[in-house]
Image (cartoon, rainbow, N blue to C red):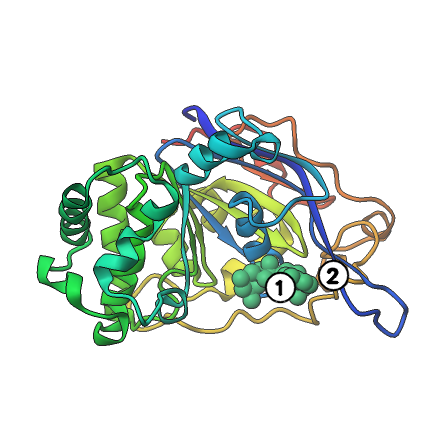
Amino acid sequence: MSESILKVRGLTKTFKVPANAAGKNQLRALDGIDLDLARGETLGLVGESGCGKSTLARTLMMLERPDSGSVTWDGVDPFSLKGKDLLALRRRVQMVFQDPYASLNSRMSAADIIAEPWRTHKTMYKTSRDRAARVRELLHLVGLRPSDEHRYPQEFSGGQRQRLGIARALALNPSVVICDEPVSALDLSVQAQVLNLLNDLQKQLGISYVFISHDLSVVRHVADRVAVMYLGRIVETGATDAVFDRPAHPYTEALMSAAPKLDAGSRGKRIILEGEVPSPLNPPSGCRFRTRCAHATDICASTVPPAAVDASESGHVAECHHPRRPVSLGVPVAVG
Ligand SMILES: Nc1ncnc2c1ncn2[C@@H]1O[C@H](COP(=O)(O)OP(=O)(O)OP(=O)(O)O)[C@@H](O)[C@H]1O
Ligand SMILES: [Mg+2]
C-alpha cells in the first residue's frame, strides 16, 4: 500500500450519559480503533447504526477529542496543534454530510455557501475577484452551472444540493474528505451520479476518502479497502473484494450474507442478524460480538480476541477467536 496519510491507533472515546438501570453512565463509543488511510484511496467504513462510525468521523475531523489513543495526519498529531498550525491541518480534512438540507444554510446563496470556509481561512484567496472566480470553478467541478451561484439550497434538487455540499468541502483544497452517508438521502438514480462525481474528483484531485455507509453495495462500488465496525471496534479490515467475498469475521460474514447482491433490483434490503446489538453502556466481556455469534465458545466470553496489529497495513485482518477463514488471517493482501 502506498504511504499512509492517516494513522489511528488505539482510539477510544467515551460519552458521559444519564445512568441506565444498572447505574452505568459511561458510553464507550470508540474502543481501541486502529485504522490507516492511504493517499488517494477510498476506505469504506461499515457497521450497524450506533456502532460509532460518525463518532469516529467527528474525532478524525477534530470535532471530538479522544480519551486515549492517537490520530496522526501525515505524522502530525492534530490534538497537539494550536493556532495557525491547527488551521492549516483543518483545511486539509473536510467532510460531506448525509443530509445536504440540514448541513447547508438555507439563508445563504450557493456562492456564499462555497465561499464561507474562506472566511476562516483568509489567506487562501486574497481578492473578491479571485474568490468569485473560484466559486464558479468549483460549481463547474461538481457539475453545477455558474449561474447556480445565486440560487439558494431549497431551490436545488437533492442531488444538486449534495453537489453543492461537495463543492463547499472542496473549497479549501482538502487532501481528505470524510463522507458520512453522503448518498443515503438521495434517490437511487441520483446516488449513482453523486458517486460517479466523487470518483471523478478523486481521479482528478487525488483526494482520499473515508466513506461511511450502511449500504454495502455502495461501499463495494466505491471502496478500495473496507473496515467493518461493531460496537466501537473495527473487527475486520482488508481489500474490498477480500472482505466482501472472503469475510473472516463471523459478523462480516453475516453482514455480507444478508447484503443485497450487486445485480439490479435487489438493493436496499435490511441487514438482519440474530439478537440485538448490545448497549455500548454495557458491552459483552471478551469478544463484543459473541452474544450474537453462532461460533462463540468459552474463550470468546473470557478473552478479547487478539488485536491484529502485526499484519501489514494492507493486510486482511479480523479480530476473532474462530475466524471463518484462518488462512487469510494476518497474511498481507496486496492492495492495488
Ligand atoms: N454526543 C454524544 N453523547 C452521548 N452519546 C453519544 C454522542 N454521540 C454519539 N453517542 C453514542 O455513541 C454511539 C455511537 O454513535 P454514532 O453516532 O457514532 O454511531 P453511527 O455508527 O454513526 O450510527 P448511525 O449509523 O446511526 O449513524 C451511540 O450509542 C450513540 O448513542
Ligand atoms: Mg452516523
The crowding category of the residue bearing disc 2, from other C-alpha atoms within 10 Å (few below 14, some 14 to 19, many at least 20), is many
In this view, the residue farthest toward the front is 127
| Percent of width and height locating residue 178 | 43, 48
Q: Where is residue 50 drawn, in percent x and y?
A: 62, 64
**Can you tell which quarter of the image residue 325 is in?**
top right
SS assignment at label 1 = loop
Query: Marks 2 and 1: in contact by CB < 8 Å?
Result: yes
Q: Which residue is mark 1?
A: 50
Q: CA distance from mark 1 to mark 2?
A: 9 Å
Split into quadrants, the picture shows ligand 1 in the one at: bottom right
Left or right side of 176 for 138: left
Judged left or right of residue 18, residue 215 is left
Q: Where does the N terminus fall, quadrant-wise?
A: top left
Task: Report whether residue 169 is seen.
Answer: yes
Q: Does the rendering let one see residue 48?
A: no
Element marked by disc 2: loop
Residue receiving disc 2: 280
Q: Circle 1: is it few (<14), some (14-19), or many (20+) Cα within 10 Å?
A: some
Asked whether 35 or 288 is in front, the reply is 35
What's the amino acid at mark 2?
Pro
Q: Ligand 1 near label 2 (Cβ, under 8 Å)? A: yes
- Return the residue nearer the eye: 254 or 225: 225
Residue at (34, 61) in percent of width and height: 262
